[in-house]
Image: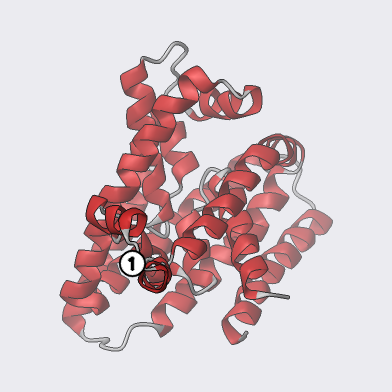
Amino acid sequence: MSNNIIIFLKGIFMGVCDLIPGISGGTVAFITGIYERLITAVANITPKNYFNLVFLKNKKDRKKLFSELDILFLCLLFSGIFTAIILGSRVISYLIENFYVYVFAFFTGLILASGVFISKQIKEKNNLNKWFGLIGFLCGIVLLFLTPQEVLNPSKLLIFSSGFLAIFALFLPGISGSFILLILGMYEYVVNLVKDFDLVNLIPFAIGAGVGVLVISRVVKFLFNFDKCKTLYFLLGLVIGTLTIPIRNIYFELNNISFGLIFNLVILFVFGFWIVKKLDRF
């Protein structure tokens, strides 16, 4: 399988996870080993870079700049994300509606294993850095207690703001864009926009997401350059803290608990954990 197809499939996986409240596409980026590459590529999106790309006369220089900006990578990845969101909105809605606890049991295994993956990237495991992990954990726990609202007729400003905040999940492992939309009361509304392809309201959402991408990518890149270990500890704590969200969701959805149900949930959890370990080894 070519590298381009693999990048596209990683985008598909990220897009699917971004549709599920409590699951972060950023976590998938970490699992699949493209997190820092994604941040760097998006942070390099500047008017100057793209002006040079368009107006460079020398084909060799243009090709070199195209490669340095990692444009092919971004195009393939975001094509996968958008494909998953457009095609998967109905499928994910069906799975969550009919197999809710099974879906979240599987992704809980993914999330926990991704925490192990992140911890492997941390080189300096001193007590000071671990405090940042605790701060991230507490931030994740806070998300557990936020109560989703419901908005029926949102303004264009709220739609824009929802896109801006939801896209943070692409760069912050542990924070789910769908969960942010739930908190804002915009999840069902945005899913319906995608299903109905309502461009009038999708455009403000997309613009907000675009602005959010440019802002958060630069913030995360700055933090990585400033102190990578502390940033990774914070992200690790965030992942572990937000793990309580899918666990809470599973608990509230369980009605008639049986040995067979628990066994199936454990199998799916272990399977999700195993997949990440295989990806890590790969």
- Residue 130 spot, x, y in % from top left: 24, 76
Residue occupying the point 35% across, 28% down: 160
Which residue does the numbered mark 1 point to in the structure image?
40
Please indicate, yes or no, whether residue 46 appears anywhere in the rendered image: yes
Residue visible at 71% across and 39% down in the picture: 255
How many numbered marks have been drawn onto this rendered protein structure? 1
Identify whether 279 is placed above or below 93: below
Q: At 28% across and 66% down in the image, what residue appears?
A: 234
Q: Which residue is farthest top?
A: 153
Give SS at disc 1: helix
The quadrant of the picture occupied by the C terminus is bottom right
The residue lying toward the viewer, choosing from 181 and 15, is: 15
Frontmost residue, 38 versus 19 = 38
Q: Position of residue 229 (x, y in %)?
A: 26, 79
Quadrant for residue 77, please give it: bottom right
In the image, residue 263 lies at what x, y percent?
78, 63
Above or below residue 89? Residue 28 is: below
Task: Work out whether 264 lies above or below 186.
Answer: below
Neighbor class of circle 1 (other Cα within 10 Å; few <14, some 14-19, many 20+) is some
In the depicted view, which residue is nearer to us: 144 or 205? Answer: 205
Query: Which residue, as the protein is rendered here, is positioned at the far front?
Result: 57
Residue 243 seen from this side = no
Quarter occupied by the N terminus = bottom right
- The amino acid pointed to by label 1 is Thr
